[in-house]
Amino acid sequence: MKQGEEDFKFVKEKNEDKGNYIFQKDKLTRYGFYFVGTVLAIIGIVLFVV
């Protein structure tokens, strides 16, 4: 059985009508990225101190 071609982008620009992307370039994505990065950094610092 042949599998269909998978063509997806990592980041979607605001003007594109595609649905095959992982992240969208907007404020919510940037906020989520920084939030997750900050939480991981805090956990790393706590683990390093302990």
Image: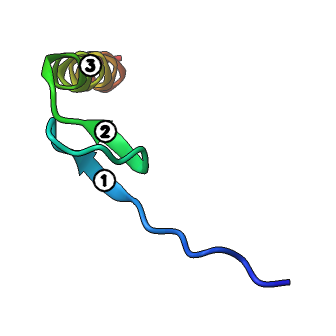
**Dot 2 surroundings within 10 Å: few (below 14), some, or many (20 or more)?**
few
Q: What residue type is labelled 1?
A: Phe
Q: What element carries label 3?
A: helix
Instruction: Give the residue at mark 3.
Output: 32
What mark, if any, has residue 31 been given in the picture?
A: none
Cα–Cα gap, marks 2 and 3: 11 Å
Q: Pick the residue in front: 24 or 43.
A: 24
Q: Which of marks 1 and 3 is in front?
A: 1
Q: Is mark 2 on a helix, strand or loop?
A: strand
What mark, if any, has residue 10 been given in the picture?
A: 1
Query: Residue 36: which quarter of the image?
Result: top left
**Dot 1 surroundings within 10 Å: few (below 14), some, or many (20 or more)?**
few
Instruction: Give the residue at mark 2.
Output: 23
Q: Do the residues labelled 1 and 2 touch (CB within 8 Å)?
A: yes
Residue 40 in the image: x percent, y percent? 31, 24
Q: What residue type is labelled 3?
A: Gly
Residue 45 in the image: x percent, y percent? 24, 21
Q: Pick the residue in front: 44 or 39.
A: 39
Residue 5 in the image: x percent, y percent? 56, 75
Cα–Cα gap, marks 1 and 2: 6 Å
Q: Do the residues labelled 1 and 3 touch (CB within 8 Å)?
A: no
Q: Residue at x 29, y 16 (%)?
A: 39
**Dot 3 surroundings within 10 Å: few (below 14), some, or many (20 or more)?**
few
Q: What residue type is labelled 2?
A: Phe
